[in-house]
């Protein structure tokens, strides 16, 4: 009986060993597959992330190129001009006057002014740009974008809200000879800051504006109502 039991155990050892080896082999295969699958997922994720990054970069470059493609013309502003009535040489000292929006009720200028709204100091703004009036020298149209570049490096983003009459400007149609200014800021007379309204000087809005305009940049870009 004892021999039979021992033989039975011995006979079962190869089968048990084969079973254990098979289990170990399956575990190894599963582990190998898991690592391979994880690496595949990681590789796909990295590749997809790189592709997405390339797409975003291309979009940003396209947007930047689109902005750079906007044509612009820069006009230098002289430091003096000849008074059309007296012939005297007038010095431009950097003054920036104001104009009431309530007086601009005609045509496209009137429509644009009705779309604008005053900021906290009473300056009319549209599309985050200040409404101004300039002379005909710059060939601008109502709603066209332009920047005032000051001598101190400050750039004031503007939009044409009115046109100065040629009869009120110098021979180059740059300066209003009554006030010796090349830009008139359009304001809301009901909310304009008292000191600015009393002195008629838009440069009082902030200290950085107290500097002469040295050039005006006119863009081939216009306000488009939503």
Image (cartoon, grey):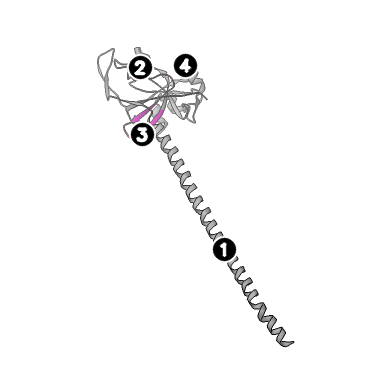
32 is higher (above) or lower (below) than 156: below
Magenta-colored stretch includes residue 147: yes
Query: Which disc is residue 108 wearing?
Result: 4
Q: Secondary structure at mark 4?
A: helix
Part of the protein shown in magenta: 132-157
Can residue 139 be seen here? The reply is: yes
Question: Looking at the image, is mark 4 or mark 3 earlier in the sequence?
Answer: 4
Cβ–Cβ below 8 Å for labels 4 and 3?
Answer: no
For marks 2 and 1, the one nearer the N-term is: 1
- Tell me the distance, in whole angstroms, between the alpha carbons under discs 2 and 1: 83 Å
- Give the Cα distance between marks 4 and 3: 29 Å
Q: Pointer 1: residues within 10 angstroms few (<14), some, or many (20+)?
A: few
Which residue is under mark 3?
154
Q: The residue tagged with tag 3: helix, strand or loop?
A: loop
Question: Where is mark 1, residue-wise?
Answer: 29
Measured as percent of width and height from the top left, residue 165 is found at: 37, 14
Nearest to N terminus: mark 3 or mark 2? 2
Q: Secondary structure at mark 2?
A: helix
- Seen in the image, is 109 located left or right of residue 94? right
């Amino acid at each position: 009986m004892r021999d039979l039991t021992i033989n039975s155990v011995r006979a079962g050892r190869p089968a048990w060993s084969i079973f254990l080896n098979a289990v170990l082999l399956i575990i190894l295969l599963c582990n190998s597959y898991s690592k391979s699958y994880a690496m595949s997922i990681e590789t796909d994720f990295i590749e997809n992330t790189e592709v997405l990054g390339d797409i975003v970069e291309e979009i940003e470059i396209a947007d930047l190129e689109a902005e750079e493609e906007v044509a612009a013309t820069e006009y230098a502003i002289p430091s003096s001009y000849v008074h059309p009535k007296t012939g005297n040489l007038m010095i431009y000292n950097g003054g920036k006057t104001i104009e009431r929006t309530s007086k601009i009720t005609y045509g496209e200028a009137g429509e644009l002014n009705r779309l604008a709204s005053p900021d906290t100091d009473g300056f009319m703004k549209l599309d985050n740009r200040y409404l101004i009036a300039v002379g005909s020298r710059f060939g601008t149209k109502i709603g066209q974008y332009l920047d005032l570049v000051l001598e101190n490096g400050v750039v004031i983003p503007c939009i044409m809200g009115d046109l100065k009459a040629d009869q009120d400007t110098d021979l180059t149609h740059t300066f209003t000879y009554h006030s010796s200014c090349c830009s008139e800021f359009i304001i809301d007379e009901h909310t304009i800051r008292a000191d600015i309204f009393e002195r008629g000087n838009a440069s009082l809005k902030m200290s950085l504006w107290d500097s002469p305009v040295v050039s005006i940049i006119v863009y081939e870009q216009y306000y488009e109502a939503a």
